[in-house]
Image (cartoon, coloured by chain):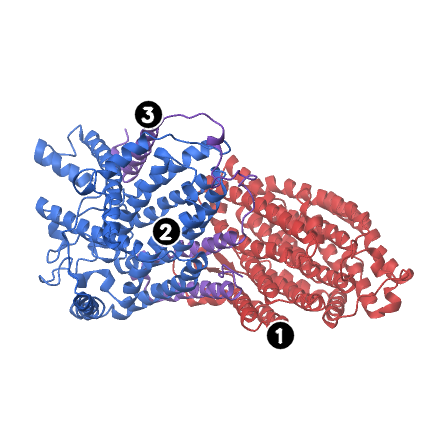
Chain colours: A purple, B blue, C red
Amino acid sequence: MLAVSQLGSWLPIALLFLVAAGLALALASVSALVGPRRARGVHDESFECGSEAIGSARERFGVKFYVVALLFIVFDVEGVFLYPWAVLFRELAWPGLAAMGFFVATLAIGLVYVWKKGALDWEH
Amino acid sequence: MQPLADQLIRSWIHADPGAWPYTQAVYLLFMLIAGALLTTFTAVFSGIVSWYERRLAGRMQSRIGPNRVGPAGFLVWVADALKLISKEDTIPGDSDHALFRAGPYFVVTGLVLTFVALPFGDRLIAADMNLGLFYILSVTALVVVGLIMSAWSSNSKWSLVGGIRSAAQVVSYEIPAGLAIMVPVLLAGSLSTQGIIRAQGGPAGGSFFLAGGWPWNWFVFDDPMAFVSFFVFLTAALAEGNRTPFDLPEAESELVSGYNTEYSGMRFSFFFLTEWANLWVMSALATLLFLGGWQIPGVAPEVIGHSAALVFVSFLVFVVKTVALVNVVIWLRWTLPRIRVDQMMVLCWKYLVPIEMAAVLLTALWMLGFAHLVPAAQSAIHGVFFLAAGAVPLVLFLRQTFANLRLTSDRVDLTNW
Amino acid sequence: MPVSLADILALLPEILLSLGALLLMMTEVFLAGARRGYQALLAALFTAAAFAAFLAQRGGGPRVLFGGFAVSDGFALFAGATICAGLLVTVVLGAGFLAPRSAERGEFYALALLAAAGMCLLVRAEDLLFVFIALELMSVPTYALVAYLRTGDRPSEAAFKYFLLGAFSSALFLYGAALVFGATGRTSLSGIAAAGGGKLLLAGLALVIAGLSFKIAAVPFHMWAPDVYEGASTPVTAFMAVGVKAASFAVLTRILVTAFGAPALAAVWQPLVVALALLTMVFGNLLALTQRNVKRMLAYSSVAHAGYLLVAVAAASRGFSGPSARGEAVSSLLFYLAAYTLTTAGAFGALAALERMGPDPQPWDLDRFAGLAKRRPWAAAATAMLMLSLAGIPPTVGFIGKLLVFKAAVDAGLVPLAIAGVLASVVGLYYYLRVVVVMYMQPAPLGSVPTPASWPLDLVLVATATLVLLFGLAPAGLANAALSSTGLLGG
C-alpha cells in the first residue's frame, strides 16, 4: 500500500485542488439553485453599452500582443535556467558566475536588439 | 504538516507514529483539514479585505464608506456574498458555454493552490516543498489561463481586449518578478519558502541582537540589489495581480469591466475573490522573500519549533507584516492614477527587466566578494546598509509627515472607523 | 559535470559564429544608417575564422567534450569545415543578391551565422539531447531566413510550410529519441550502443530516421522541399540545400553508426536506408526531369543528391561490411558532402546571378540561361562546369564523389543499389545538360532584360567552378583528408 507520507507534498496539492474546486463548484451550484432565471432574448446578448452587437468578437487583434508573447517565452526560459543556478550558486562560485554572466549578457544583447528595433514601443 | 501530526500523535495518543496503524489516516485527515482551512481562509480574507478596502478608501477620500451592516459596516461582505449567490448566473447566448463556465474555476483554483506552499509561521505550512517558489509561480499561471478563457469565451469585445491586455501584462511582469525572486533565492540558496525564511535568521549562534528576525537580518537590507529587487517585486506583483495602478485589463472608463464584463452572480464574484485573495499572496510572498517572514526578533529560528507559544508568535509576526503590506497596496490603489498601456510596457521591459538582470548578477558578485569575510564583518555590513537604506529614510519620512501635519494643523486620527 | 577550458576552446568555431551573429545584430541597430557593405565582410570574416578554427583543430585526436555531450573528432571537424565553406559561399551570395534589391540587413547574416553555429554543434553532438538542441538552433534561424525576402505570397507560404514540417520533423525526432531513451535508459550515443534494446528501440530508431529524413529531404519526406526552396530567396535556398543537408547527414550518419552500429541493429536499418536511397534517387531525378523552372529543378536535384548520399550511409552499416569498408563509406560520404556543397552552392549562385528582378511569375525560367554563352562567356563556362559536376561527369569533383560513393556501396555488397544509382544519374544527365545546351545553343529570347552583373555573384561562380575543376582533376588531397576524418568516436 502506498503510504500517504510517501506522496510528500503532492497529496496536499491534490487535496487542496479538490477542496478549492469543490467549494467553487458548490457555490456556483447554490447560486444556480437560488438565483432567478430570466427569459432569453435581449437578455442573453453580449454587453455593448446598450447598442446592438456588431459581428463577433473573435476577430484578429494587434500583432503587438504576439510580440509580447514571444518576448515572454525568451525571457521566461532565461528565468527557468536561472532557478537551478541560483539554488546551487554557492557551489558553482566564480565559474558559475562567469557562465551565467555570459548567458545573461547574450540575452541582454537580444533585449537591446528588440529595444532598438522598437518592439518594446507600444505606439508606433 | 507531517511533523506537526507526528507531534500530536505522540503527545495526545502517546503512540509511536511509525508503528501506530492509523498514522496515515491521520495524515490524510490533517491534509483535508488544512485544505478546508486554507480555502476558507482565502474566501474569508478576501471578504474582509473587500470591506476593509472600502472603509480605507472612504477615509482617504473624506467620506464614510460602508457603515450599515454590522458594526462599522463590517458585515457588508457577508451581505455582498449572499446577494451575489442569489443573483442570476447569466451566460450570454453567443458565448462558448463550456469555457465560459470553466474560466472562473481556473482562476479560483489557480490562486488557492498557491496557499499550499505559503507559510503562516514556523511549521505552519501545508507542504514545505523544496521547489516551493517555483511551484507558486507555476500555479499562478493557471490564473492567466482562466482569465484568457473567460475573456475569449465571452464573445464580447470588451472582454477580449481586457483579456489579452491582462495576458500581455501578466506575462510581461512575470519576467521582472521572477528575476527579483531570484535575488533572495541566490542569497538563501533554496527555493523552499521556509528555507528562505530560515536563511533570514541571522548568523548561527548569534547574540540577542544578531539572532532572529531583526530588520538588519532581512534580505531587503542585505545589499543594494536586494533593496531594489524588493520594490521591483512589489511593482511587478501589483501588475500581475491587475491592481491599480496596473488595472488596465479592467479599466472601467474604457473597457466597462474588462474580462469579467459578461459575468454576473457567483462567477463574477470569483474574479474578485481572486483579486483580493491575491493581495494576501503577493504580500505574503514579499514578506517571506524580503522581510524576514515569521522570524521573531531575538529568537534563533531553531528554538521556535520547540514551543507552541513561539510558533504562535511567529504566526503573529508573519500576519502583521503581511497585513501591513496589504495596507500599503490598498493605499497605493487609492493614491495613484491608472497608467497607460504603453507606459505599462515601457516600465516593464525598459526599466524593470534590465534592472533585475543586472541585480541578479550583481548579487552573485556581491556574494562572492563578501564570501570570505568573517560573519561579524558581514553582520556589520548588513547593519550599515540597514541604517542607510532602512532606518534613515524611515526617520526622514516620519519627520516630513509630522512637519506636514503641523503645517496643515491636522492631526493623526485613528478613531473614525 | 566538469567543464574545462579546453572543452570551451574546442567549441571555438561555434563561439566565433555566435559572436559574429551577436555583433551583426548590434551593427544592425547601432550602425543602421551607414552603408551596409561592411556587414557581409564582417560575416565573411567570422565565417572564415570559424573555418580556420576547424582546420586548426585537425590533427588532435578525438576528444569527448562536456562530459559526453559533444565530441571533437575528425568527422565533426571535416563536416564543420564543409558547413563553414557553404556558409561562406552563402554570405557572398547574400551580399551580391541582396544589395541590388536593397534588402541587405545584418539580420540576414546574423541568422545565417546562428544557424551555422547550430549545424556545427549538430555534427559534433554525442547525445540525443544535444542533438535536439543543436537541431533547433539550426532550424529556427532557418525558418526565419526562409521568410527573409517576403515579397509576394510565395516566401510566406514557403516559410510557413517549412516551419510546420520542420516542427513536425523535430517532434518526430524527439519522440524517437524519447523512445530510445525509454528502451535503453541512456541518451548518449555510446551509452545507447552499449545498452542495446528491444522493439521499443527499433521504433525509436525508425522515428529518428524519419525525423532526420525530413531535414535531408529524402523521398517520401521531400514534399516540402521544392516549394520551400522555390519560395525562399536564392541565397537562403543555397544555404538550406548545402548547410542543413550536410549537417543533417552528418548527424544521421553519426547516430546510425555510433548508437545503432551493432550488427543486429544495422541489419534493421540498412534495408530502411537502402529503400530510402532508392526511392530518393529515382523520384528525385524523375521529378527534376520535367521542370522548366531552374530553381525547382535544382530543388529536385538536391533531393536526388540526398539519395546518392544515402547510398553512402547505407554502405556505412557496419554489420555487413567491417571497419575498413565502413571507413571507406564514411569517407566517401564526407567527400561527397564537400563536393555537393561546392557544386550546389555554385549552381544556386548561377541562378542568383540570372534571376529576374522585380515582380515576375517566372523569374527562374530556363529562358534566363538562353544566350548566356554569347553575353557572358565566363559565367556560362562556370555554370556549365557546375552543371557537369552536378551530373557527375569527369573531370569534375562531382564525378569523383559519385565514383567514391558507388565504389563504397559495391565494397559493402550493395551492388544493385550502386547500379540503380548509376542509372539514376544517367537520367540526371538530361536535365543538367539541358541547361548547358540552352546556354550555348539557344539565343536569348527577344525583349528579355539581362540581370546586371554583380561582382560577388561572379566571384562565387568563378571560385566554385574553379574549385570543382581543381578537386576534379586532383582529388587526392580532399579524398585523403576525408579518409583521415572517418574516426567516429565510439563507432
Foreground label between 1 and 3: 3
**Which residue does the numbered mark 2 point to in the structure image?**
B240
Q: Nearer the viewer, residue B385 or C175?
A: B385
Q: In the rendered image, is residue A64 in sight?
A: yes
Residue receiving disc 1: C38
Within 10 angstroms of label 1, few (less than 14), some, or many (20 or more) residues?
A: some
| Quarter of the figure that contains the N terminus of chain C | bottom left
Q: Which residue occupies the foreground of this view, C105 or C130?
A: C105
Please give the name of the residue rendered at 63% of the width and 44% of the height, measured from the top-left corner.
C320
When the figure is inspected, residue B344 is found, relative to residue B80, above or below; the finding is: below
SS at circle 3: helix
Placement of C446 over or under C254, stated as above or below: below
Task: Tell me, for residue A34, which label it has, or none.
Answer: 3
Q: How many C-alpha atoms fall within 10 Å of the one at disc 2: few (<14), some, or many (≥20)?
A: many
For the residue labelled by badge 2, is the local secondary structure a helix, a strand or a loop?
helix
In the rendered image, which quarter is residue B105 located in?
A: top left
Mark 1 → mark 3, Cα distance in angstroms: 75 Å
Dot 1 falls on a residue whose secondary structure is helix
Q: Is residue C11 left or right of residue C435?
A: left
Q: CA distance from mark 2 to mark 3?
A: 34 Å
